[in-house]
Image: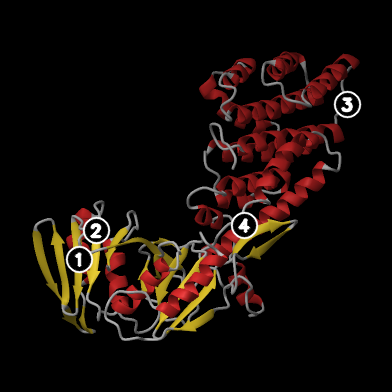
């Protein structure tokens, strides 16, 4: 989607933005020179610094400014020191891209300091010139240098910024997160929950309520990035100095931002009795969500979000789209074998034609048995849909998932668990452990803590799960998410 060299490309953006503002400030309010020669020298320096030459040209200007500073005084001295510090900071930031490995050392040499001393020296120099007309740009230069030097952009620090530099860093941080593993969680760090704000102000229904809080914050980050990008595009078109140089970079980030969809994690409405698994598993991102209930199957497509023009809009792969659901009845033929339901298979086949390769997540609500869910799973398979993930409810109502593979009882694993009505039978290699149900103040229940403890040592090994047909599917879900709490490996589901 987009490439990276060395540190994230926001270093380049920050560098160009900072120098643009430095030059703009100097062009707008240039102190009078003490002599014609001085005016010519400073004018020439400003002109030479209107574009970066990272192959020696701009470093030479820094050297010229250093020599000029030795004999300058008053307003000329302040201007020259400011220009040198701002331009040198820009070059340091540019050097982080990895394409000019010697640039940082060259800048240090031009300033007469060692390379390890360069950044502290620049921070002190920017502090010294941070007064009067130079203060806004000097302070923002120091802020941006601190942000870039920290390695990763801290969302909280980024929120404290303002102006073009903040907008460019914000847009690029959002673009840099797109397409990465865990992109929703990373984007969520840059946004606020619009539903929480809506509840606090008007109490009106939120148009993003179908998404989990992390997804809503991720969508908000896209919205803010879109607004920031629009502001940058308007500035680039206004003729502000050096913004023409930024236009290509703004366009590149804009092309990524406006052509990428994100798939936020869906949230379950309170009325659905979906089994809760806390923080076990991983955030789910299915395109089609199926909820099996006694005698009925609900289904809905999970919307995605993308930037269109200056807005973020919700898109869908099919109908109905959350928060709306469609459903069909499951006719119980009372067969005890794990075979597809004919009518259910026909419904799923219609969904498969609508979205042949879409990802599927399956959850249950209410009193669903193991045999009923097993038959639903093989009906999905018969209809040609991909093997679904097992889905449950997380701490914030979000869908959390676990990847499974449907296998027969003859396909074993180093660790396997058989769920009986009376407890677990755990096979660890050649060892068989019987783990009956336990009784406490809440009554008789499966020993999930014991299951997790007994199987923790083999968490990196393949694991299989089998169950009696009459066991409640909610108990199967509990065992599955305790066998694979971090969802690092798929779980073999022995249902054939």
362 or 398: nearer the viewer: 362
Q: CA distance from mark 2 to mark 1?
A: 8 Å
Tell me whether the residue at label 4 lies in contact with that at label 1, contact meaning CB atoms closer than 8 angstroms.
no
Direction from residue 339 to residue 135 in the image, left or right: right
Which residue is denoted by mark 3 in the rendering?
32
Coordinates of residue 213 in the picture (x, y in percent): 53, 67
Between circles 2 and 4, the one closer to the viewer is 2
**Could you say whether the residue bearing mark 3 is in a helix, strand or loop?**
loop
296 or 485: nearer the viewer: 296
Between circles 3 and 1, the one closer to the viewer is 1
Coordinates of residue 147 in the picture (x, y in percent): 58, 41
Which residue is denoted by mark 4 in the rendering?
221
48 or 339: nearer the viewer: 339
| Whether residue 343 is visible | yes
Query: Within 10 angstroms of label 2, few (less than 14), some, or many (20 or more) residues?
Result: many
Tell me whether the residue at label 2 lies in contact with that at label 1, contact meaning CB atoms closer than 8 angstroms.
yes
Nearer-N-terminus badge (4/1): 4
Direction from residue 365 to residue 245 in the image, left or right: right
Query: Within 10 angstroms of label 3, few (less than 14), some, or many (20 or more) residues?
Result: few
Between circles 4 and 1, the one closer to the viewer is 1
Could you say which quadrant of the image residue 424 lies in? bottom left
Label annotation for residue 417: 1
Which residue is denoted by mark 2 in the rendering?
463
**Could you say whether the residue bearing mark 1 is in a helix, strand or loop?**
strand
439 or 479: nearer the viewer: 479
Between circles 3 and 4, the one closer to the viewer is 4
Tell me whether the residue at label 3 lies in contact with that at label 1, contact meaning CB atoms closer than 8 angstroms.
no
Between circles 3 and 2, the one closer to the viewer is 2
| Residue at 82% in and 35% down | 241
Q: CA distance from mark 3 to mark 2?
A: 78 Å
């Amino acid at each position: 989607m987009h490439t990276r060299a060395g540190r994230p490309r926001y270093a380049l953006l920050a560098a160009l933005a900072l120098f643009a503002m430095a030059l703009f400030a100097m062009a707008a309010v240039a102190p009078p020179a003490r002599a014609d020669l001085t005016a010519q020298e400073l004018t020439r320096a400003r002109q030479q610094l209107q574009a970066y030459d990272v192959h020696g040209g701009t470093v030479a200007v820094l050297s010229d400014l250093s020599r000029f500073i030795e004999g300058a005084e008053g307003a000329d001295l302040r201007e020259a020191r400011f220009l040198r510090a701002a331009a040198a900071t820009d070059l340091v930031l540019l050097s982080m891209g990895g394409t000019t490995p010697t640039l940082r050392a060259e800048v240090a040499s031009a300033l007469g300091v060692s390379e390890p001393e360069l950044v502290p020296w620049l921070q002190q120099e920017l502090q010294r010139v941070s007064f009067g007309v130079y203060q806004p740009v000097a302070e923002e230069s120091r802020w941006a240098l601190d942000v870039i030097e920290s390695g990763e952009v801290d969302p909280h620090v980024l929120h404290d910024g303002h102006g073009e530099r903040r907008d460019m860093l914000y847009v690029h941080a959002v673009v840099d997160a797109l397409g990465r593993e865990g992109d929703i969680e990373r984007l969520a760090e840059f946004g606020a929950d619009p539903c929480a704000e809506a509840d606090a102000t008007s109490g009106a229904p939120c148009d993003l309520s179908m998404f989990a809080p992390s997804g809503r914050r991720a969508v908000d980050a896209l919205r803010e990035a879109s607004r920031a990008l629009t502001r940058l595009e308007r500035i680039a078109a206004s003729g502000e100095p050096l913004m023409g140089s930024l236009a290509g970079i703004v366009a590149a980030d804009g092309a990524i931002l406006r052509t990428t969809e994100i798939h936020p994690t869906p949230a379950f409405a309170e009325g659905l009795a979906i089994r809760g698994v806390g923080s076990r598993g991983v955030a789910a991102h299915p395109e089609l969500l199926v909820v099996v209930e006694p005698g009925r199957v609900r289904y809905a497509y999970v919307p995605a979000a993308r930037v269109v023009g200056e807005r973020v809009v919700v898109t869908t792969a099919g109908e109905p789209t959350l928060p709306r659901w469609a459903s069909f009845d499951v006719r119980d033929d009372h067969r005890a074998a794990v075979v597809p339901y004919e009518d259910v298979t026909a419904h799923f086949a219609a969904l498969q034609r609508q979205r042949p390769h879409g990802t599927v997540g399956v959850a249950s609500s209410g009193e669903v048995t193991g045999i009923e869910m097993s038959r639903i799973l093989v009906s999905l398979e018969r209809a040609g849909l991909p093997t679904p993930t097992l889905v449950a409810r997380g701490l914030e109502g979000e869908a959390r998932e676990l990847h499974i593979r449907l296998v027969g009882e003859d396909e074993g694993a180093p660790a396997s668990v058989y769920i009986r009505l009376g407890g677990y039978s755990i096979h660890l290699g050649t060892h068989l452990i019987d783990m009956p149900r336990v009784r406490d103040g809440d009554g008789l229940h499966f020993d999930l803590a014991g299951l997790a403890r007994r199987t923790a040592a083999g968490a990196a090994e393949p694991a299989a799960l089998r169950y009696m047909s009459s066991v409640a599917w909610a108990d199967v879900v509990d065992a599955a998410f305790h066998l694979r709490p971090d969802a690092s490996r798929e779980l073999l589901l022995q249902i054939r």
